[in-house]
Image (cartoon, rainbow, N blue to C red):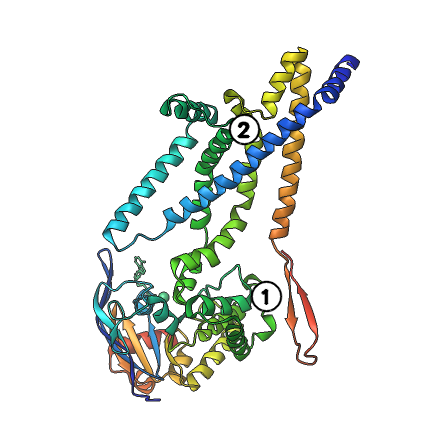
Amino acid sequence: MNTNETVFEIKHLQKQFGDHEVLRDINMTVRRGEVVSIIGASGSGKSTLLRCVNLLETPSDGEILYKGQNIQTGIPSLSRYRAEVGMVFQQFNLFNNMTVLQNCVSPQKLVLGRGNNEALETARHFLKKVGMEQFINAKPRQLSGGQKQRVAIARALSMSPEVILFDEPTSALDPEMVGEVLSVMRSLANEGLTMLVVTHEMSFARDVSNRVVFMDQGVIEEDNSPEVIFNNPEKQRTREFLSRVLGN
Amino acid sequence: MIQFFSDVWDIITKYYPQLLQGVGKTLLLALTGTVIGLIIGILTGILRTAPLSKNLFLRILHKAANGIIAAYVEIFRGTPMMVQAMVIFWGYAFATGGNTLPLTLSGIIIVSINTGAYMAEIVRGGIISIDKGQFEGAAAVGMTHGQTMLHVIIPQLMRNILPSVSNEFVINIKDTSVLNVIGVAELYYMSDIIKRQNFKTFQTYFVVCVIYFIMTFTVTRILRLIEKKLEGKENYTIFGSQSDPDAEIHVEKGA
Ligand SMILES: Nc1ncnc2c1ncn2[C@@H]1O[C@H](COP(=O)(O)OP(=O)(O)O)[C@@H](O)[C@H]1O
Ligand SMILES: [Mg+2]
């Protein structure tokens, strides 16, 4: 595996809703195996950036290259692309009508065309990995927030993704459940999964990620190693934001 | 008083074949009308909530279809079914130079189209009320809009709208009585015939009234039971507890 291979190259990405410019001139590169944390105040455009990357939002201008191909014009299938670029949401978004197991099995069959046995085996493997193998027959509404989020991660992993995008995966959780989800994410990071993580968990950003991107009012204000960002940020705004969230 | 009950008894014993035939036709019209109406509702609901295509031609077509559906809903909800029955039945006769469709078929068509207009709104409301996250979760794993509707949205929709659909069925049991204006031999039409033979107007309508009530009451209870069933079980099984891999722990939760 070539760890220097570029997975994403985002060039001059711009997004506006009506007159409201939410992202302006975003440029960044994500290489295979990198864990990039995206931090910044609420409303700074972090979710919109992730949603543009898997085309839940259509970019207004600029381009996003996935392995060198423009995702809007150069990829053969949007479905396949989205299977390769998984997403985990703040609100889990598990299918309410399906059990835990079905949540992980049916997308594999529908999108990847996998057979029943392979899909089941894959789903069981990842449900076990996130510690949810005992709950395969439960419906989402019977689970706690932390359990739901672990199933959502297993569902994304079951698609054999190249990258997973996480949009504040622990923000909707009760404090005592944050740890179980972060520890799953930590182990994925250690195994070399490429991850883009929007987070307010500064310890995760500092200890787990290879790079931290600080966003402010629709621009990337600073893109640096966690050491620099947390110990000696280059930008005044980064410093201000961190002192606000870290409370010192 | 004793005379009244003996009249009622006479009507039941003498005319039960006609009454049963009327009940059968009423239930047939109400049931098929509700089912076909539901199908109309689901199809129009899917169309109206589907994202517009990027292709200009398809986009225009889609918008035109949405406009037609909106007009259909407004018109059929805004006019009495009795008048709709006359317009459709005699309209067909007018358009074909005097031909008429079989009465039962006409009845089914009228009830279906009328119910479809209500179902269209019920289904649209049902789809809109489903959490947007369900669509996004499906899109994010790569499911197409069609797959999302079929495997994620419609199953949840059916559960959500079942009470309204049941309600439409009960309404149809009562409202199919207006089809007597075109001569469909449902229960009310039968009572008209019986009354003309025995001249016991009040007693005849009293019997029919009780029969209508028994039908709606029974159907309501049965549908309630089905709704309860579909609410689903609130318990699930945990497999392989740490100490005993074969153990099944049943967890129950309140609704
Ligand atoms: N679908 C939308 N329509 C209009 N405005 C939006 C939409 N989504 C996000 N916004 C706006 O874009 C800005 C950035 O939002 P978001 O990307 O969610 O920020 P963050 O995730 O950093 O909190 C906010 O001002 C938000 O109100
Ligand atoms: Mg956000």
Which residue does the numbered mark 1 point to in the structure image? A138
Label 2 resides on the chain identified as B
Q: Residues within 10 Å of mark 2 (few under 14, many from 20)?
A: some
Identify which residue is drawn at 33% across, 75% down: A38
- x, y (%) of residue A151? 51, 71
Q: Is residue A195 left or right of residue A177?
A: left
Viewer-nearest of labels 2 and 1?
2
The quarter holding residue B239 reads: bottom right
Q: Amino acid at mark 2?
A: Asp
- x, y (%) of residue A131? 56, 77
User: Is any part of residue B12 visible from this angle?
Assistant: yes
SS assignment at label 1? loop
Identify which residue is drawn at 56% across, 66% down: A143
Outermost residue to the right = B2
Q: Amino acid at mark 1?
A: Ala
| Figure check: B181 above or below B48 | above
Outermost residue to the top = B199
Identify which residue is drawn at 53% across, 29% down: B104
- The quadrant of the picture occupied by the C terminus of chain B is bottom right
- x, y (%) of residue B94? 38, 22
Which residue does the numbered mark 2 point to in the structure image? B175
SS assignment at label 2? helix
Identify which residue is drawn at 66% across, 66% down: B251
**Number of on-image labels:** 2
| Figure check: B195 above or below B104 | above
- The quadrant of the picture occupied by the N terminus of chain B is top right
| Figure check: A198 above or below B205 | below
Gap in angstroms between the C-alphas marked 2 and 1: 42 Å
Q: Is residue A70 left or right of residue B43?
A: left
